């Protein structure tokens, strides 16, 4: 899922409440704010990916870039929510 931080509140009704949400952005700052917004909105078990996607990649952790491969997996128990800033 992808939701710009400035639009997150308008997407709350579309987010699953039956599983944990892992929130991430590039560096970890926007996702920390998004995790706080989700927590305040009553979402349980929100996880902020500290350090962001950049730190994840730098640590050599796995990254799936093939959407077909990701879609063939069984229904996940965790949903990731990417936050970004919008530039207009």
Image (spheres, grey):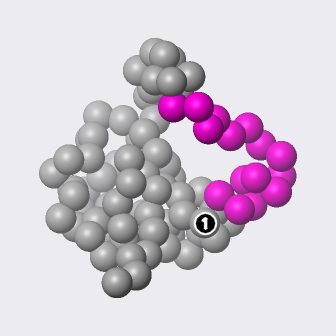
Query: Mark 1 sits on what residue?
Result: 26
**Residue depicted at x 36% and y 67%:** 4
Based on the displayed image, in which of its 4 quarters is residue 17 positioned?
top left
Residue 69 percent coordinates (x, y): 56, 22
Q: Position of residue 45 (x, y in %)?
A: 42, 47
Give coordinates of residue 52: x percent, y percent.
Answer: 63, 62
Q: Is residue 32 above or below residue 53?
A: below
Query: What residue lies at 29% left-to-right and 34% top-to-bottom?
Result: 18
State the SS at label 1. loop
Q: Is residue 71 left or right of residue 13?
A: right
From where the camera sits, is residue 69 visible? yes
Counting from the top left corner in percent of width and height, residue 62 is at 73, 38
* Residue under the point 82% across and 57% down: 58
Q: Residue furthest bottom?
A: 88
Q: How many marks?
A: 1
Label 1 neighbour load within 10 Å: few <14, some 14-19, many 20+ = some
Does the magenta portion include 81? no
Q: Magenta stretch: give its range.
A: 53-67
Residue 84 vs 17, above or below: the answer is below
Q: Reply yes or no: does residue 64 show up in magenta.
A: yes
State which quarter of the image contains the C terminus: bottom left
């Amino acid at each position: 899922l992808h939701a710009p931080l400035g639009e997150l509140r308008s997407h709350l009704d579309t987010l699953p409440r039956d599983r944990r949400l892992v929130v991430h952005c590039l560096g970890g700052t926007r996702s920390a704010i998004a995790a706080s917004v989700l927590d305040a909105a009553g979402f349980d078990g929100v996880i902020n990916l500290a350090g962001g996607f950049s730190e994840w990649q730098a640590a050599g952790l796995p990254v799936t870039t093939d959407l077909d491969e990701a879609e063939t997996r069984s229904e996940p128990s965790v949903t990731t929510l990417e936050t970004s800033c919008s530039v207009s």
